[in-house]
């Protein structure tokens, strides 16, 4: 069996490596050149895109910003999973918000800004602490803006007036006071079965994920169930097939959806060593209509991203239960180069192991690690 | 980093899949065409053998019967691990026996037969139950012969007289009364560090491995230590680098070496899911001079070979902790097509899980499975 993945980065590569033992060969599409490539070497396979679509038993994506004409072409084959609407919901914050509201899923209060005049109502509706986000990524002049006072909003008015808000609206979102960012990954099969992985706790720095820990500390069955229910509602409503990531804010025992990603996700990389079935294998199983795998955890995991850095001591793989995943890319500032999965039998021992790991890493590239190691060491949480 | 593997079968493929996350790219040599190929697709990479030797950080093998001129050519690079003598000891039973005797490692009593006249002394030396084996495989007219009486030996004399015993001697070996066949896999690093995996128990049928279980039932620390000591003596004496498999007969608390394989081995496939580091990753680490990984077990494992059969129900992957490894080869009688790794938390539960698995398999191709499932179910042995 063959699976074609749009996008040829590390996620396609890890799908390839997870699929091969099942006798499934994954090819990738470089969406910029529209060439079919080997997901590991990135070399063209010599097969045309139309032939690869024809040959595939299933077609999927590794990122949601695949050019729409390619998605529609793939969709014509009847083999694209997840469906186009799900992919677009992940790529467009307006669609995403509509989806969440339609399903009555708690999320941050928001307004959609199609015209600068709507800015006048923002503070009254959302308060003074607001984040503005482009509804779609990759447009010149767009980005994210945070305001804390009405005066700051006034200062942005001119900048926003230069944008084509009819074409690409902004989302104005109330900045939530949350305790932590967590994520739930799960999968839905073609016959509607839903399975969820354990909740992961995510530490970001300058907008990038740095560390995930799964299961989360202070995990209650209620919280996991609440997240699973959100997942099942969303995935079912979208008629989703494959692995879906849901990013959440936790406030007390309440969960608010921050955003969704219609694909395997960085905050699920821990499943490669920390779970009976990895998110990559799970996604391949789902899109091919194979039975889903067990999501039972194997110990307590941390996933540490290696970002913009190649100068670490690779002997870190000598620490028991420390696993390197290297993507083989050229180094650039803020580029995800690889990740490290660390497994232990309790949160406290995971903290200890991260302390060992720190000896092998240039800490300026791992700003979240030491604090997290200390926090986990003190944790009396989950024991496997 | 690049590693070149002589041999392009499933072992090279599984090395490729295990090495990729470390940022190590494995290429394979089809030793019949002397072409460098991708270990998964088996397609030529377009790189010449001499260039691939030049590019490699390490060179290794997936089977011991690599033509000697290729081994010697590879060895000239100074990058071949394990060394040529170790590979030849695995390919030649005379060298193997000399190695074992030199290191005073218990093995089955034997005679080397260079001339038919030596047959006269066989029964006196070894008794009437004897197995004759070609010292090297792949020669016309050679094979294995078992005798139970002196009369049977007499009947073979003519057949043996037609062989060129000077060039390819026979080994006459006393047939041992053993309780079970077990194997020890381990690795030795370039700096002489030795680590061993847990002992595996192997069930054969018509000369082929069908099922391995690891750790073995009724495992005592003494027995594991005895096996580890044999491993360390052998690997150190051979100046071995990489993963080495030692097949053993257990008689009471005594261990006798049956044979060695200077490579990753079918009886170590359970390590893919059952161990912190798989034998494939361990071998790659060793030959590249990277730190060896932990050999801690993750539960209790069974490895079930899929031999000469494609007609099983692939939904078996829906059983929790059952993992398929499919090699993507064309089916032939007695050909290893893939294997299934099954993990549980005790031998008894492993037996239960094998019973579940049986529902998905055509049992005529898995003659050892049902009996082993029953035996394990009754086992009060190892609990993880």
Image (cartoon, coloured by chain):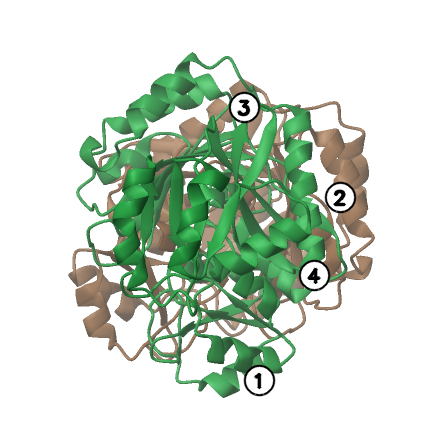
Chain colours: A brown, B green
The answer as to whether the residues below labels 1 and 4 share one chain is: yes
Q: Quarter of the image for the N terminus of chain B: give it.
A: bottom right
**Camera-nearest residue between A156 and B54:** B54
Tags 3 and 2 in contact by the CB under 8 Å rule?
no
User: Mark 4 = which residue?
Assistant: B239
* Quarter where residue B284 is shown: bottom right
**Camera-nearest residue between B256 and B54:** B256
Tags 4 and 3 in contact by the CB under 8 Å rule?
no
Query: Alpha-carbon distance for marks 2 and 1?
Result: 38 Å
Element type where label 3 sits in the image: helix
User: Mark 3 = which residue?
Assistant: A223
For the question of whether residue A268 can be seen, the reply is no
Q: Position of residue A43 (x, y in %)?
A: 41, 78
Say which mark, if any, is on residue A354: 2
Tags 2 and 1 in contact by the CB under 8 Å rule?
no
Residue appearing at x 62%, y 38% in the figure: A301
Q: Chain of mark 1?
A: B
Query: Alpha-carbon distance for marks 1 and 3?
Result: 56 Å
User: Mark 1 = which residue?
Assistant: B54
The first of marks 3 and 2 along the sequence is 3
Establish if B148 lies above or below A218: below
Query: Alpha-carbon distance for marks 4 and 2?
Result: 35 Å
Query: Alpha-carbon distance for marks 4 and 3?
Result: 55 Å
Residue appearing at x 67%, y 34% in the figure: B226
């Amino acid at each position: 069996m063959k699976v074609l993945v749009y996008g040829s980065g590390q996620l396609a590569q890890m799908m390839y490596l997870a699929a091969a033992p099942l006798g499934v060969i994954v090819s990738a599409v470089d969406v910029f050149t529209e060439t079919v490539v080997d997901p590991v070497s990135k070399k063209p396979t010599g097969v045309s895109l139309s032939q690869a679509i024809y040959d595939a038993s299933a077609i999927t994506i590794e990122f949601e910003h695949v050019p729409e004409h390619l998605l529609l072409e793939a969709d014509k084959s009847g083999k694209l999973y997840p469906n186009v609407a799900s992919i677009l919901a992940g790529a467009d914050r307006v669609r995403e918000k509509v989806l969440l509201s339609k399903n009555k899923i708690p999320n941050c209060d928001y307004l959609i800004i199609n015209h600068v005049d709507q800015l006048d109502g923002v503070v009254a509706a959302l308060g003074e602490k607001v984040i503005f986000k482009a509804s779609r990524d990759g447009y010149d002049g767009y980005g994210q803006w945070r305001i804390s006072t009405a005066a700051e909003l006034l200062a942005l008015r001119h900048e926003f007036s230069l944008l084509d808000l009819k074409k690409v609206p902004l989302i104005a979102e109330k900045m939530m006071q949350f305790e932590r960012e967590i994520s739930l990954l799960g999968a839905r099969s073609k016959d509607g079965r839903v399975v969820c992985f354990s909740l992961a706790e995510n530490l970001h720095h300058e907008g990038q994920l740095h560390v995930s820990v799964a299961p989360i500390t202070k995990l209650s069955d209620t919280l996991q169930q609440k997240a699973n229910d959100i997942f099942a509602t969303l995935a079912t409503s979208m008629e989703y097939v494959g692995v879906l990531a849901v990013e959440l804010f936790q406030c007390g025992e309440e969960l608010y959806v921050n955003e969704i990603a219609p694909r395997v996700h960085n905050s699920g990389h821990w499943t490669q060593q920390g779970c009976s079935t990895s998110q990559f294998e799970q996604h391949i199983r789902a899109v091919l209509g194979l039975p889903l795998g067990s999501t039972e955890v194997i110990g307590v995991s941390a996933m540490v991203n290696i970002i913009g850095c190649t100068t670490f001591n690779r002997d870190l793989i000598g620490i028991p239960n420390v696993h390197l995943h290297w993507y083989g890319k050229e180094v650039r500032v803020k580029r995800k180069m690889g990740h490290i999965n660390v497994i232990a039998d309790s949160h406290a021992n995971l903290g200890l192991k991260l302390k060992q790991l720190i000896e092998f890493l240039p800490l300026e590239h791992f700003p979240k690690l030491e604090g997290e190691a200390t926090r986990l060491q003190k944790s009396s949480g989950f024991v496997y």
